[in-house]
Amino acid sequence: MQRNQSRQGFDLGRAVKKFFLSGFVVFAFIAYVIHERLTNPDASLTSAPLTPINAAIPDQSSPLALAPFPPNSSSISAGPLSATSSPLASAPLPTDTPQTLPNSPAASSGLYKDGTYKGPEIDAYYGLVQVQATIQSGKIANVQFLEYPSDRRTSVEINNIAVPYLQQEALQSQSASVDIISGATLTSEAFMMSLQNALNSAKN
Amino acid sequence: MGMPVTIEVIDPSATEGLFDTVFKYFEYVDGKFSTYKENSEISQINNHDLELEAATEDMKTVFELSELTRLATNGFFDILHNGFFDPSGLVKGWAIDNAAHILCEKGLENFYIEAGGDIQVFGKNSQGNNWRVGIRNPFNIDEVVKVISVSDGGIATSGTYIRGQHIYNPKIGDQPIIDIMSVTVIGPNIFEADRFATAAFAMGYEGINFIERLHGFEGYMIDRDKRATFTTGFERHVLHD
């Protein structure tokens, strides 16, 4: 009886210690997460670039390649400049050349050197895509598409999301010899009867 | 049907009697199914002089095939129009198919049968190549706008340019098809190609999508803007100059 009681008291003390220890661990983890969020708010936006980032031409070393575009300010919403292959395939491509990103927080922090920077050619599955960014006064002034495959029939169909398998062409007369010709009925009783009726009514 | 029938046989075993058999078969079908002949069986049914239950086996077969096709095309193929039955959108292909079987049973392997622009081909042409089939230009009937290569199969074209508006979309009544000029369908045989070409034409622009979804069929649609739209596998059949 006594032995049992003393053991219970001993177990209770250990349980309380365990509780406080695990509580401290949980608290420390939560505090760490909050701290990270507060000090690095962009972390969640830049977490998943699809391809390695290497946008700027190497002759001018520029932090452009490392800075994410604001996600909602343009159609190239994927983040880093060169990580555009899959979003470009699904988002409508801007057809007018200059595209300004005036409210870019990265630009406003003055990280960029003025100049014009070409991104690499990226294979967007249906063709190559290449963009060029222009920096003025440390801000992104223009983003131009140097290359995107709008001239190709397949890419146009993908971009329009219209009947992706069917193809079109203008009618063109063929001179090759044929064995047989397929077409709608050349002569028929209906045609003859219609003609006859027309001629009959033409008589009166 | 009242239309020219052309038969070309490459096999040397072909006889005049065989040609006669086939031409007589077409006359038989014409006499039974022509809606322009007052005494044809189809006219008797339309005049309520004959019940379908009392009709011949061939007539019942055509009605059954028409109903199956109506169901397979979501109602776009329908032989009932303004209270009259007109199975001509299917009978021609069915008749050519049957005629081709007559020749096959006699051991012929290289021939074609053409009736009113619908074609069944077997084997090779006189040069030993696939049969070369031209698609007529609906804007200029003396012109061919595509040449395709087919060995065993059926090629049917449904259109409006010769007879006037003779195909109607059964879902919108008497409004004629005006946005497309013709649909050419390549299929496993002319019966299949003919009935689905008729249905595809009745669907208008949507018809080529219908053909695209059919397994074993390819299509070439010509619209009123002199533009052609064709299915994924169509290019495989095309012969270039």
Image (spheres, coloured by chain):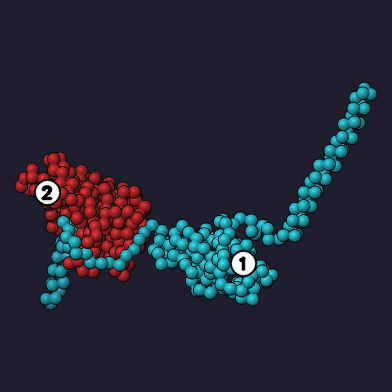
Chain colours: A cyan, B red
For residue B238, what is the image quadrant? bottom left
* Residue sitting farthest toward the left: B16
Q: Residues within 10 Å of mark 2 (few under 14, many from 20)?
A: many
Residue at horizontal 24%, vertical 57%? B239
Q: Return the residue at label 2.
A: B9
Residue at horizontal 15%, vertical 62%? A187
Residue A130 visible in the picture: yes
Three-letter amino acid code at the position of disc 1: Ser
Q: Secondary structure at mark 1?
A: loop
Q: Chain of mark 1?
A: A
Q: Position of residue B228 (x, y in %)?
A: 31, 64
* Residue sitting farthest toward the front: A59
Q: Nearer the viewer, residue A118 or A123?
A: A118
Q: Return the residue at label 1.
A: A62
- In the rendered view, tell whether residue B15 sits above or below residue A10: below
Give the foreground label among 1 and 2: 1
Q: Chain of mark 2?
A: B
